[in-house]
Amino acid sequence: MKLKHLEYQLSSVQPFRNPKILLEQYVTPPHIAACMLHHIQSEHEDISSKIVADLGCGAGCLTIGTATLAASMVYGFEIDVDALSIFQDNIQEFELSNIEAIQCDVKKIPRRFEKMFDTVIMNPPFGTKHNAGIDLEFLKIGVNLASNAVYSLHKSSTRNYVKNMGKIWEKK
Amino acid sequence: MKLLTHNMLTSKCLKGVSVGYPLGINATEVTTSVVDFDPEFISRLIPKLEWHALKQASDIIGEKGYLPEALIADYENNEEFLKKVHHALLEIEVVSGNLVCPETGRSFPINNGIPNMLLNEDEV
């Protein structure tokens, strides 16, 4: 699928109605979501025919984009019931049957899911609202859940820190 | 909620629960959907499953006896078997009902196909 086409599709995903600041519910803009997913598939082939998890899926922009790019199955994990209700509306609108959602705290995903996913994607909370470190916590969980690759969006000011943590985890 | 999801979920994060698996299922609404069949994907999933839990869930929610008691040998090359597993895992959907912790009886509601595994602070 062409990048432009994917972005066009994702522009019809409904965003949060009343974003909750404490949960850092920022919408992943369709352009960024489309670029990210298109890159993951065209450069690394980590979506099509894979089982993928989206941590903190919110209204589901990345989840739906992943399902559209022919993932075998995509799991969206989300704590907030209001976000999930929009998520559900969006899935029905797109008529996708390769999506599952679970309402839970990402930090409490059962251990049976470890290494179950080929690929983990996320636009995590950045840890700027009295929750410092949550971005790295999400990333660490992603690394545990994925057997192959984790793709995550971060604040560019934290780039070096994230890189270093990656090296430390690699050694463990 | 697909039975694949049921096969992965546990209630182990509840205080005092040691295994929390498999969760019981009470379904009030079940539907079936059509999902593209990919034999290679199903073959890849099978080693990650608890067969007994899938078989039990399929007996309760789907058709009793649809899946065999035990996983068959050489399943990668048995398309008929893989199609059955595909149907049980991905095409049967619990729209509403409850998942039940086998140790405490704590019930987790399923609404609109989404299981709610959130816990109260005093349960952790």
Image: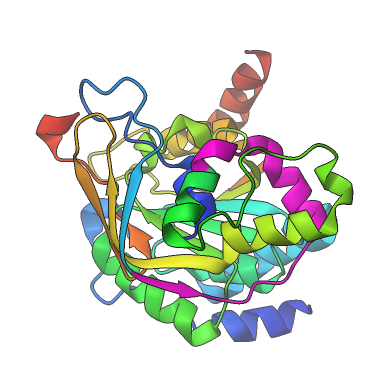
Please tell me how many numbered marks the rendered image carries: 0
What span is colored magenta in the figure?
Answer: B29-53
Q: Based on the picture, tell me whether residue B38 belongs to the magenta stretch.
A: yes
Q: Based on the picture, tell me whether residue A116 belongs to the magenta stretch.
A: no
Along the line of sight, which residue is nearer the eye, A153 or A74? A74
Residue B106's x, y, as percent?
19, 40
Residue A76 versus residue B47 in the image, above or below:
below
Furthest residue to the left? B122
Residue A95 versus residue B65 in the image, above or below:
below
**Residue at (69% x, 45% y) in the render:** B45
Residue B63's x, y, as percent?
51, 63
Q: Quadrant of residue A32?
A: bottom right
| Figure colour scheme | rainbow
From the viewer's perspective, tell me whether residue B74 is left or right of residue A21: right
Residue A63's x, y, as percent?
54, 64
**Residue at (42% x, 42% y) in the render:** B9
From the viewer's perspective, tell me whether residue A100 is left or right of residue A116: left
Q: Is residue A90 visible?
A: yes
Along the line of sight, which residue is nearer the eye, A41 or B41? B41
Q: Is residue A123 visible?
A: no
Furthest residue to the right? B77
Residue A69's x, y, as percent?
71, 70
Furthest residue to the top? A172
From the viewer's perspective, tell me whether residue B101 is left or right of residue B21: left
Q: Quadrant of residue B115?
A: bottom left
**Residue at (47% x, 30% y) in the render:** A111
Q: Quadrant of the C terminus of chain B?
A: top left
Q: Quadrant of residue A14?
A: bottom left
